[in-house]
Amino acid sequence: MKIKQEKQGFSFIRHKIKSSLYRIGQKAIASVYNYIPKPNLIYIIRPVIVITRICNANCVFCVYQFLPDSERVHMPNDVFENTVRAIKAANIKAVSVTSNSGEPLLVSDILDKIKALRDAGVEKIHMGTNAILLDRVGIKRFLEEGPDYIYISTTAFDPDMYKRLYRSDQYERMRDNIMNLLQENSRIEKRRFIAILIRSDIEPEKVYAMPATQKIILLADKIEIRQEYNDCCGVITPAILPKGMKIMKPRIKTNRPCHVLMQFPAIYPNGDIAACACQNYNADKDMYLGNVNNGDFIQAIDNLSKIIESWKHGWRPQTCNSCSMYSDPALYWPTYIRAFVK
C-alpha cells in the first residue's frame, strides 16, 4: 500500500510539473504562431477512418442517438481497400481507426484491416473503443496485432452510472475487459499506450476514491475524468444530460485554424473525405474534400489546405462556426517543435 501511495504521489507531482511547462509553452507558441512558416504547421495528416457508424451503446452525451438508420453502416470492403491504397499513395504514417458515432470492434475483421494498414506503411494506429467487445476479439491478440494507441471511453466503475450514461447492460463485461486489458498490457514486453476517459455525473474526487479507479491509475498510461460535454453543434442540450453533467462553454476562436481541422480529415463509410472528424455530423458541404473511391486523396489534402488558408482570412465552414470544441493549435506546441526537428 505504501508503494502504491508513493507511486500515486509521484505521478501527481509529475503531472503538475508537466502541466506548468505546457501552459508556458502554450503562451509562447500563441504569441509567435503567426510568424511561424506555415508549411511546417500542417506537420502530420492523420486521417480518421470511420470504419463504422454503428454502436453497441447509446450514450446520453453522444450524437449517435440522433443518427438516422440509413447512416448506421459499416464501411464496405471495397471502400476500405480504396482507402488503404490512397493512404499508401499519400505516404501516410499515422491513422485513427476510431469512432465517429460508432464502435470499431463491431467490425468483425477489424484486426485484419489493421494489418492491411500496417502493410500499406502506416506506423502508428490509434483507436477509440468502449471496450465491450474486447473479449470477443481476444485481449492477447488485440494487444499483439491491434492499435498502438488505445483510447477507452467508459464511465466510473459503477453499474448504475454505466446504465444511466451509456444505457447499456454490458457493465460487468466492460469492466472485466478493461481490467484484463490493463493487466495483460502491464505484463507484455511491447506495451500499448492505453488511456481511459471516464465519463461521470458525480464529482471527480468521488471517482478517484473508488477502488477500481485506484487500480487503473497504476496500470493506465493516462486517465481523464469528464463531466462537461460539447453540444455537438447544438444537438446535445442540457435537458438531455443527467444531473451532474453539463454543456461546456464554447471556446473562443482565433485566426489560428483549429488543430483538429489541420490534422484529422475523416474518411466516411461511403468514401467521402471531410475536413473534420470531430463535429461534422451532417456532411457539411463546406467541409467536403473529395471521395476516396475516385483516387483523389492527395487532391483532398490540397483542398484542406485551402480551407485552412481561408480560416486565417476570416472565413470558416458553417460547422466550424457552430462548433464549441475549437482546439487552438497553440495547445499542441510540443508537436510543432518535433515538426521542426525532423
Image (cartoon, rainbow, N blue to C red):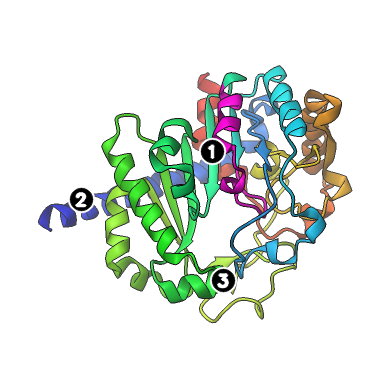
Q: Is residue 221 visible?
A: yes
Q: Which mark is residue 126?
A: 1
Asked if residue 141 lies left or right of residue 255, the reply is: left
Please name the residue shown 38% across and 66% down the image: 157
Residue designated by label 2: 7
Instruction: Work out whether 202 lies above or below 289.
Output: below
Residue 248 rendering spot, x and y as whole percentages: 60, 67
Asked if residue 11 lies left or right of residue 291, the reply is: left
The residue type indicated by label 1 comes to His
Asked if residue 79 lies left or right of residue 211, the reply is: right
Local crowd size for mark 2, using a 10 Å CA cut-off: few (<14), some (14–19), many (≥20): few
Identify the mark nearer the N-term, 1 or 2.
2
Q: Secondary structure at mark 2?
A: helix
Local crowd size for mark 1, using a 10 Å CA cut-off: few (<14), some (14–19), many (≥20): some
State the CA–CA distance, disc 1 to disc 2: 27 Å
Please name the residue shown 77% across and 29% down the image: 301
Residue 114 rendering spot, x and y as whole percentages: 57, 31
The residue type indicated by label 2 comes to Lys
Please name the residue shown 69% across and 28% down the image: 38
Q: Which mark is residue 167?
A: 3
Magenta segment: does it hold 110?
A: yes
Q: Closer to us: mark 3 or mark 1?
A: 3
Asked if residue 300 lies left or right of residue 219, the reply is: right
| Span of residues in magenta | 98-118
Q: Is residue 23 visible?
A: no
Local crowd size for mark 3, using a 10 Å CA cut-off: few (<14), some (14–19), many (≥20): some
In what quadrant of the picture does the N terminus appear? bottom left
Looking at the rendering, which quadrant does residue 87 occupy? Answer: top right
Q: Residue furthest left?
A: 2
Q: Secondary structure at mark 1?
A: strand
State the CA–CA distance, disc 3 to disc 2: 35 Å
